[in-house]
Image (cartoon, rainbow, N blue to C red):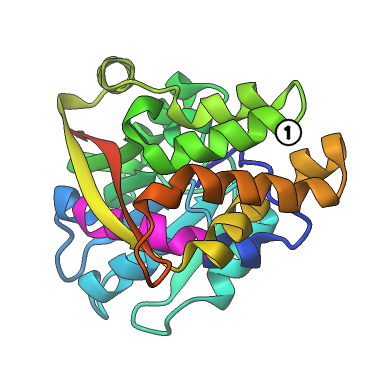
């Protein structure tokens, strides 16, 4: 998830990958369906994080295809490589910023970006570079989170960060929900893409038992901010606050099915 990542805890990208998977993976099929990669296609997963979209794309493009993933975070790339499902083709994961990609012009039939565009320091430069590496007629698709008031799970995380994350935490957290469909479609047109469109995608996602999952996910994403501001014990208190806020949505088995809404933006080169 992105060129400038959330504040992953000291447990590292492995923990991020494990705890983010239930939330991130349901959107992968929608993202890839929007660019429709067929056998032999070349696909770039931009700001790939730990490679959820790249791993899924490899199964779609077949032995004649090509899949690359680029991300600024070396730890995320390390986990992406380790998690390669060993399907064909091999996936080329590379440490690189979104605005300076190490690929030839018109190298890809499709470029996808899952929950990364809101973190680009310079959206215009990143999308211009994405346009450069997309062949004429190729497809681009990105997801970003819809507004925070649509996301009960993330609202619970926000409250915990406000309480225990220190004065800078709310600003960091808000970045994940900072991009609008209008901003993205305008930037895509300016970058050289055509026919931009957008729609909302909502999944009711069943999360693992929250007594372990919710505190673990909070710590994986924001553990660094919480411990720096309030100490190690604050992680336990912050996790408890998330659980309390979601208690009314929790099933007898401890799981919770919650709505997550993303904006899917598409365009053609």
Residue at x-position 27% and y-position 70% = 65
**Left/right of residue 49 with respect to residue 152 in the rendered view:** right
Furthest residue in direction bottom, as rendered:
86
Mark count:
1
The residue labelled by disc 1 is 165
Along the line of sight, which residue is nearer the eye, 264 or 233? 233
**Left/right of residue 191 with respect to residue 4 in the rendered view:** left
Q: Is 86 included in the stretch rendered in magenta?
A: no
Q: Secondary structure at mark 1?
A: loop
Residue at x-position 25% and y-position 21% = 185
> Which quarter shows the C terminus?
top left
Residue at x-position 32% and y-position 47% = 112
Along the line of sight, which residue is nearer the eye, 218 or 172? 218
Residue 90, position in %: x, y? 42, 77
Residue 224, position in %: x, y? 77, 45
| Quadrant assignment, res 64 | bottom left
């Amino acid at each position: 998830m992105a060129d400038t990542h959330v504040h992953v805890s000291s447990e590292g990208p492995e923990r991020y990958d494990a705890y983010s998977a239930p939330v991130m993976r349901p959107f992968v099929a929608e993202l890839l369906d929007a660019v429709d990669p067929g056998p032999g296609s070349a696909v770039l997963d931009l700001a790939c994080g730990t490679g959820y979209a790249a791993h899924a794309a490899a199964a779609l493009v077949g032995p004649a295809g090509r899949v690359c993933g680029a991300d600024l975070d070396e730890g995320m790339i390390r986990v992406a490589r380790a998690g390669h499902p060993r399907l064909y083709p091999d996936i080329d994961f590379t440490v690189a910023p979104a605005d300076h990609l190490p690929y030839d012009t018109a190298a890809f039939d499709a470029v996808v970006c899952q929950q990364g565009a809101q973190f680009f320091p310079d959206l215009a430069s990143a999308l211009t570079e994405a346009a450069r590496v997309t062949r004429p007629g190729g497809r681009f698709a990105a997801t970003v989170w819809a507004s925070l008031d649509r996301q009960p799970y993330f609202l619970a995380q926000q409250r915990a960060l406000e309480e225990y994350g220190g004065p800078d935490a709310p600003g960091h957290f808000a970045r994940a929900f900072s991009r609008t469909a209008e901003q993205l479609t305008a930037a895509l047109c300016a970058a050289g893409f055509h026919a931009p469109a957008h729609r909302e995608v909502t999944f009711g996602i069943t999360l693992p038992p929250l007594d372990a999952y919710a505190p673990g996910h909070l710590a994986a994403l924001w553990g660094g901010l919480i411990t720096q501001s309030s100490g190690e014990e604050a992680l336990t208190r912050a996790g408890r606050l998330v659980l309390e806020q979601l208690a009314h949505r929790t099933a007898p088995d401890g799981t919770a099915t919650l709505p997550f809404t993303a904006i899917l933006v598409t365009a053609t080169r």
